[in-house]
Image (cartoon, rainbow, N blue to C red):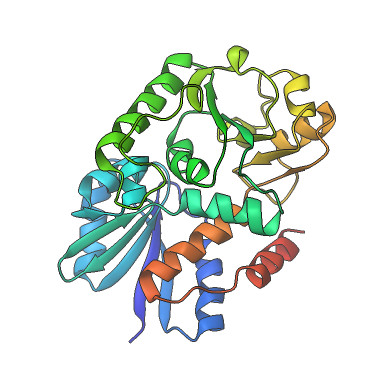
């Protein structure tokens, strides 16, 4: 009988995770079954426990349940602790273990597939929601010199930064590049869109505005001065943020399909103990979208 996994969320019908993990399983010879699990907005824990009790081995967690998954998990990885959010659950004999693979997926996509070395770079993330939580720690660990979180509501960005700094001081695992000491002044800050400043090498969209085709209220000069504009979201067609960045004069812009595949590979590794090759899966999904 195949080991059972799934992605849980609301909505979840659009998820490409089943296709990705089916390709990973075939490539690595792993016998798994992977599906979609739609959980009621007020019934996440019940849905997870029902899946686990029926023999499920693990779950990917997508919106809007990453914070609930963090609260529910009996044990958490160091990167999940720093993020304050969980996107991967593994069910072991001694309880559920929560992990967060989003940041590792973003860093691997940026550095390995797109060839953007992050050490010494200035990075701006637009948005202060759950998508941003999971990537702050891995970006800093990759050597980013300056990381700015900008949000429509400045207080949310400032609060997110404060939450992260508290977690870094009290929860960072031994051997982490983020020990329990204060970060250098100015290396990490939160602000509003108008106060994001300039000189950023990488601008990352972590808002959901682009899904509705909305233009973000940021200056064209901010995008034009970047080496790369990156949208965490992906679509069959060019996303609104990618279009906005290219129109503003940014020399290079891409969506987050690569991040999706890379974070899925991190989850697969946590579950099965083997890392699949991501390039052929990314290329297949991109060809399907085209």
Q: Position of residue 248 (x, y in %)?
A: 82, 27
Nearer-the-camera pick, 44 or 261: 261
Q: Residue furthest top?
A: 194
Residue drawn at (74%, 32%) of the image: 226
Residue drawn at (55%, 43%) of the image: 143
Q: Quadrant of the C terminus?
A: bottom right
Image height of 217 relative to 203, above or below: above
The quarter holding residue 19 reads bottom right
Q: Quadrant of the N terminus?
A: bottom left
Drawn side of residue 242 relative to residue 120, left or right: right
Drawn side of residue 214 relative to residue 154, left or right: right
Nearer-the-camera pick, 121 or 90: 121
Q: Is residue 22 visible?
A: yes
Count the marks: 0
Q: Position of residue 195 (x, y in %)?
A: 59, 13
Residue drawn at (76%, 30%) of the image: 244
Nearer-the-camera pick, 78 or 213: 78
The quarter holding residue 37 reads bottom left
Image height of 186 relative to 226, above or below: above
Drawn side of residue 143 relative to residue 134, left or right: right
């Amino acid at each position: 009988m195949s080991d059972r996994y799934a992605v849980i969320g609301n909505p979840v019908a659009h998820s490409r995770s089943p296709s990705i993990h089916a390709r990973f399983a075939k490539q690595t010879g792993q016998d798994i079954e992977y599906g979609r699990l739609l959980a009621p907005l007020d019934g996440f824990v019940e849905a997870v426990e029902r899946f686990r009790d029926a023999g499920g081995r693990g779950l990917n967690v997508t919106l809007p349940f990453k914070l609930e998954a963090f609260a529910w998990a009996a044990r958490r990885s160091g990167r999940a602790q720093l993020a304050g959010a969980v996107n991967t659950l593994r069910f072991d004999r001694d309880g559920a273990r929560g992990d967060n693979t989003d940041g590792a997926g973003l860093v691997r996509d940026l550095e390995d597939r797109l060839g953007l070395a992050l050490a010494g770079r200035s990075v701006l993330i637009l948005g202060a929601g759950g998508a941003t939580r999971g990537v702050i720690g891995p970006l800093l660990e990759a050597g980013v010199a300056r990381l700015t979180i900008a949000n429509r509501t400045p207080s949310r960005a400032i609060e997110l930064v404060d939450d992260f700094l508290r977690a870094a001081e009290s929860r960072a695992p031994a051997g982490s590049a983020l020990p329990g000491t204060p970060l250098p002044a100015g290396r990490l800050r939160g602000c509003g869109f108008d106060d994001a400043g300039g000189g950023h090498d990488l601008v990352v969209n972590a808002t959901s505005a682009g899904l509705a085709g909305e233009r973000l209220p940021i200056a064209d000069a901010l995008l034009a001065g970047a080496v790369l504009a990156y949208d965490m979201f992906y679509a069959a067609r060019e996303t609104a943020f990618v279009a906005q960045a290219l129109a503003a004069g940014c020399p290079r812009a891409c969506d987050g399909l690569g991040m999706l595949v890379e974070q899925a590979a991190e989850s697969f590794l946590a579950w099965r103990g083997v890392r699949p090759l991501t390039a052929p899966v990314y290329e297949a999904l991109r060809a399907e979208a085209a």
